[in-house]
Amino acid sequence: MDLGLDGKVALVAASSRGLGKASALALAREGARVTICARTEADLEAAAEEIRRETHAEVLAVPADLTSEEGIRSVVTATVERFGGVDVLVDNSGGPQRGKFPDLTDDDWRQAFEVVTLNFVRFVREVLPHMREKRWGRVIGIQSSSVKEPVEYIDLSNGLRPGIAGLMKAIMPDLAKDGITINLVLPGMFLTSRIHPGLADGAAHIDKTVEEQLAPLAATIPLGRLGDPIELGYLVAFLASEQASYITGAVYQVDGGKIRSNV
């Protein structure tokens, strides 16, 4: 299937590794020109070179602090200067720290709000003028299963992520008038270093010891395994495509069946 992404400009946030990098790779495989961004320049350049080597796509790597308005604006500005606009935004961010409600301070909540909520708000706000100009755009937010079902020991996520879904629904009708779709993707448990520090990106080569350590976690998932990040990346690429032009305001879980909610 031709997704119609050849030559489109995709900006993928927090994309030096994990689900962000997998999303950038999936888009590049479809012919998109891709901007990746993260704080650590060495990791970012390594990811950019890996994507270029595999796909021969144009990849712009922009080091930036994505918890600041200035950092986010610098990424969008660099993308527009290099590629002439932004067609696809994949908003991804680091997760908030683990912690139960009684232990969390005001500073913990403020920091999590910057990482989760303001990251989404600022990125969408910055790219919208460029999408409205073309009357075409795709906004895809990588959020969390906590949008549908509370996550144990991460009450910061439980308190903030569902609000992103509410915001997405609220702004969706206005974006639709200009041909811009907005959807959320909710990852379950994936083979990334966030799950286990011994994991590289992807499921191809898992150390036997790490596999054994993850076995109890895998047993809680109906499909019996953790996901490969590229499996989420393929859904992101589809939602960015021409074929997904009638999908907006939707929430998709990619979790091997772990989320038990029926809505």
Image (cartoon, helix red, strand yellow):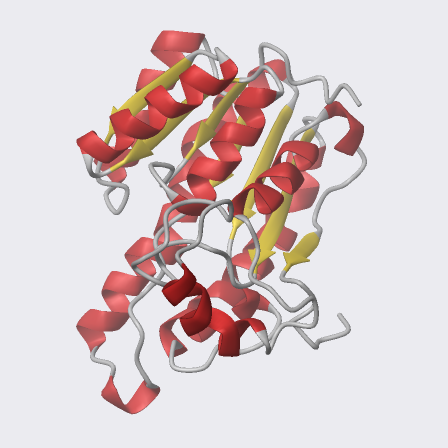
Front-most of 139 and 47? 47
Residue 102 pos. (x, y %):
28, 91
Specify the farthest residue to the front: 208
Front-most of 134 and 220? 220
Residue 126 pos. (x, y %):
41, 31
Does residue 249 appear left or right of residue 156 in this picture? right
Residue 127 pos. (x, y %):
46, 28
Specify the farthest residue to the bottom: 102
Residue 222 pos. (x, y %):
69, 72
Please identify the quadrant where the C terminus is shown.
bottom right
From this view, report whether residue 89 is shown above or below residue 144: above
Q: Residue at x 30, y 63 (%)?
A: 112
The number of discs equals 0
Q: Residue at x 38, y 56 (%)?
A: 116
Does residue 32 appear left or right of residue 152 in this picture? right
From this view, report whether residue 108 is shown above or below residue 199: below
Q: Residue at x 66, y 59 (%)?
A: 253
Does residue 126 appear left or right of residue 225 in this picture? left
Q: Residue at x 65, y 53 (%)?
A: 169
Please identify the quadrant where the N terminus is shown.
top right
From this view, report whether residue 26 is shown above or below residue 172: above
Residue 56 can be seen in this image: yes
From this view, report whether residue 188 is shown above or below residue 61: below
Front-most of 203 and 42? 203
Q: Quadrant of residue 3?
A: top right
Q: Quadrant of residue 99?
A: bottom left
Residue 74 can be seen in this image: no
